[in-house]
Amino acid sequence: RKEVEQDPGPFNVPEGATVAFNCTYSNSASQSFFWYRQDCRKEPKLLMSVYSSGNEDGRFTAQLNRASQYISLLIRDSKLSDSATYLCVVTNTGKLIFGQGTTLQVKP
Amino acid sequence: DGGITQSPKYLFRKEGQNVTLSCEQNLNHDAMYWYRQDPGQGLRLIYYSQIVNDFQKGDIAEGYSVSREKKESFPLTVTSAQKNPTAFYLCASNYAVTVDQPQHFGDGTRLSIL
């Protein structure tokens, strides 16, 4: 079983839609959690950290459920520019463990 | 501008050849990392370094070697022992390995076999 698992998608949604991505992790000792965004053939860039209480950054909301070892990312009012691969990342003693990514394609 | 610089952007390797990928950072970070990404896959850790003159194997170190002679630099050599080197290689850095903070990435090197 992979340490971090994501549904690879692709998720094809129209502009303005709300879309949610899920991620599960297997190591209960994981300490920090992030969502990264990766555009085609580019390096990953930090989208947002994920906190236990849940956190929001504009149209993006991240949630963490430590009991279920589950992380989510909600994108509201999708834009064409949101099309990318979203990587779920957990840490353990400073090392990042990456999920394989979920691909989002927002259509006009 | 502070950041991580990887070079070259594209690299081609012949059979039996060793190639070296460069990674330089001016963020004053102690920790540096090398990852490999294959199409449709997440990143996998090759090697990491917590401090100058120290480095540790990651999950897929076989066929690779690194050095950390300066804080700013962490070059990766893909040796001829790495039979499937075609991938996207990403270098990253962080304040320290033990600090669970997000890592900063360079813009990557694409390595292909000739």
Image (tube, coloured by chain):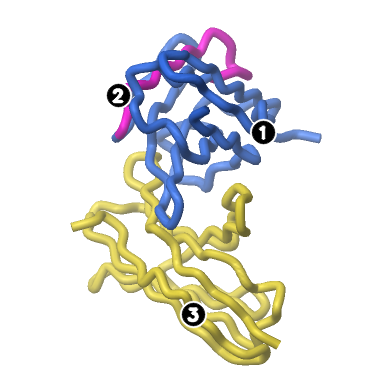
Chain colours: A yellow, B blue
* Residue in the picture at 58% in, 16% down: B71
* Residue in the picture at 71% in, 35% down: B3
Q: Position of residue A27 (x, y in %)?
A: 23, 55
Residue corresponding to mark 3 = A11
- The N terminus of chain A: image quadrant: bottom left
Q: What chain does mark 1 sit on?
A: B
Is A55 situated above or below B106?
below
Neighbourhood count class around disc 1 (C-alpha, 10 Å): few under 14, some 14–19, many 20 upward: some
Residue corresponding to mark 1 = B9
Taking B52 as reference, is A28 left or right?
Answer: left
Q: Position of residue A16 (x, y in %)?
A: 66, 91
**CA separation in Å, label 2 and label 1:** 23 Å
Q: Are marks 3 and 1 in contact (CB under 8 Å)?
A: no
Q: Amino acid at mark 1?
A: Lys
* Residue in the picture at 41% in, 52% down: B42
Residue corresponding to mark 2 = B62
- The C terminus of chain A: image quadrant: bottom right
Dot 2 or dot 1, earlier in sequence: 1
Q: From the image, give the main secondary structure of the stretch colored magenta.
A: loop
* Viewer-nearest residue: B14 or A13: B14
Q: Amino acid at mark 3?
A: Phe
Figure label count: 3
Taking B60 as reference, is A106 left or right?
Answer: right
Is A8 situated above or below A45?
below
Marks 2 and 1: same chain?
Answer: yes
Q: Secondary structure at mark 3?
A: strand
- Residue B7 part of the magenta-drawn span: no
Q: Position of residue A75 (x, y in %)?
A: 57, 81
| Magenta span | B60-74
Q: Amino acid at mark 2?
A: Glu
- Residue B73 part of the magenta-drawn span: yes
Q: Residue furthest left?
A: A1
